[in-house]
Amino acid sequence: MNEKALYKSRLDNCPLTFALNLIGGKWRLPIIWTLSKNGTMRYNELRRNIDGITNMMLTQTLKELELYSIIEREQFMEVPPRVEYSLTEDGKNLIPALKALANWGDKMKNKEHSI
């Protein structure tokens, strides 16, 4: 029997859980946020703008975000080859929700310090 089929949660169909699984992980939010601030970027620009990320993690995370249609990858047939990454419409639609979450987190952080 498949182990994955054994575990069922009442949250399996929750849209919030689904969304958080798409953007969760150590590097997904920094990549999304960097692209939202800078627009279209090349691989090395992204790597320089995200402190501590390795080439392997950047490559893997970019592939995952592309698979989820949050970012798009455009390859130009030039010599040397050029690849650019940017947010898709779905990725751009995510930014207001992230800003609202950041505002909420800021309020909670300030509240914690006043206790």
Image: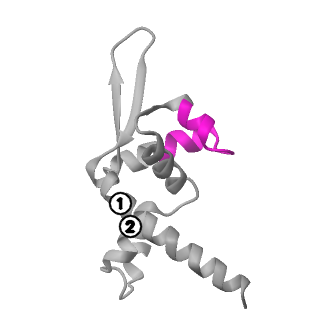
Would you place residue 61 above or below residue 2 in this image? above
Left or right side of 1 for 60 = right
Would you place residue 105 above or below residue 48 in this image? below
Magenta-highlighted residues: 45-61
Element under disc 2: helix
Residue type at mark 1 is Leu
Residue 81, located in which quarter of the rendered image? Answer: top left
Most frequent secondary structure within the magenta stretch:
helix
Tell me residue 61's x, y (percent): 49, 47
Would you place residue 4 above or below residue 70 in this image? below
Furthest residue in direction bottom, as rendered: 115
The crowd level at tag 2 (other Cα within 10 Å; few <14, some 14-19, many 20+) is few
Name the image quarter holding the C terminus: bottom right
Furthest residue in direction left, as rendered: 89
Left or right side of 67 for 38 = right
Tell me residue 45's x, y (percent): 55, 31
Is residue 46 rendered magenta in the image? yes
Residue, disc 1: 94
Would you place residue 96 above or below residue 71 in this image? below
How many tags in the picture?
2
- Residue 97 is marked as 2
Tag 2–tag 1 contact (CB < 8 Å): yes
Distance between the Cα atoms at labels 2 and 1? 6 Å
Furthest residue in direction top, as rendered: 79
Tell me residue 12's x, y (percent): 35, 80
Judge by depth and name the residue closer to the eye, 95 or 91. Answer: 95
Residue 106, located in which quarter of the rendered image? Answer: bottom right
